[in-house]
Image (cartoon, rainbow, N blue to C red):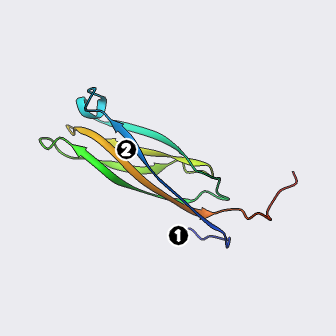
Amino acid sequence: MKKLHSHLIGIDQGAEMMFSDFAHDGPMWASQGPREKRVKIKFGERFKTPPVVHVSMSMWDTDGQTNQRADLMAEDVSNAGFSLVFRTWGDSRIARVRAGWMAIGEVAGDDEWELY
């Protein structure tokens, strides 16, 4: 459990079209085996400490004739942003993915500043 030590809590959120591979036979659509797509997300403002990041699939377009395999997660979370990572494997054919995300964490107040 992450415990927040500040009375100021920030929430940032967004959605990211991670890829659209069916139109140009990109790797998520035309390849097989392990595949990965990473998208760097930058927060609107820096958090005081690395926040908790929740990710979810907000659009998932697949070929109905193959197995549907997906792994979506946030990696490399820092005060400034994170990597949104989608993975698939085997014969899965993924046309498009849009992922939603929400970050919740401590933010600095206006009266918090450092001299050096």
Q: Position of residue 13 (x, y in %)?
A: 50, 56
Looking at the image, can residue 18 be seen? yes
- 93 vs 42, nearest the viewer: 42
Q: Quadrant of residue 114?
A: bottom right
Q: Amino acid at mark 2?
A: Phe
Q: Nearer the viewer, mark 2 or mark 1?
A: 2
Q: Is residue 98 left or right of residue 102?
A: left
Residue identified by numbered label 2: 86
Name the residue: 21% across, 40% down.
Answer: 92
Measure the alpha-carbon separation of dots 2 and 1: 25 Å
Q: Position of residue 11 (x, y in %)?
A: 55, 62
Element type at mark 2: strand
Can you say whether 11 is above or below 98 in the image? Answer: below
Name the residue: 79% across, 63% down.
Answer: 112
Residue identified by numbered label 1: 1
Q: Quadrant of residue 67?
A: top left
Q: Quadrant of residue 20?
A: top left
- 2 vs 45, nearest the viewer: 45
Can you say whether 75 is above or below 102 in the image? Answer: above
Q: Residues within 10 Å of mark 2 (few under 14, many from 20)?
A: many
Q: Position of residue 3 (x, y in %)?
A: 60, 71
Label tally: 2
Q: Amino acid at mark 1?
A: Met
Q: Position of residue 47 (x, y in %)?
A: 64, 57
Looking at the image, can residue 32 be seen? no
Element type at mark 1: loop
Can you say whether 48 is above or below 95 in the image? Answer: below
Q: Residues within 10 Å of mark 1 (few under 14, many from 20)?
A: few
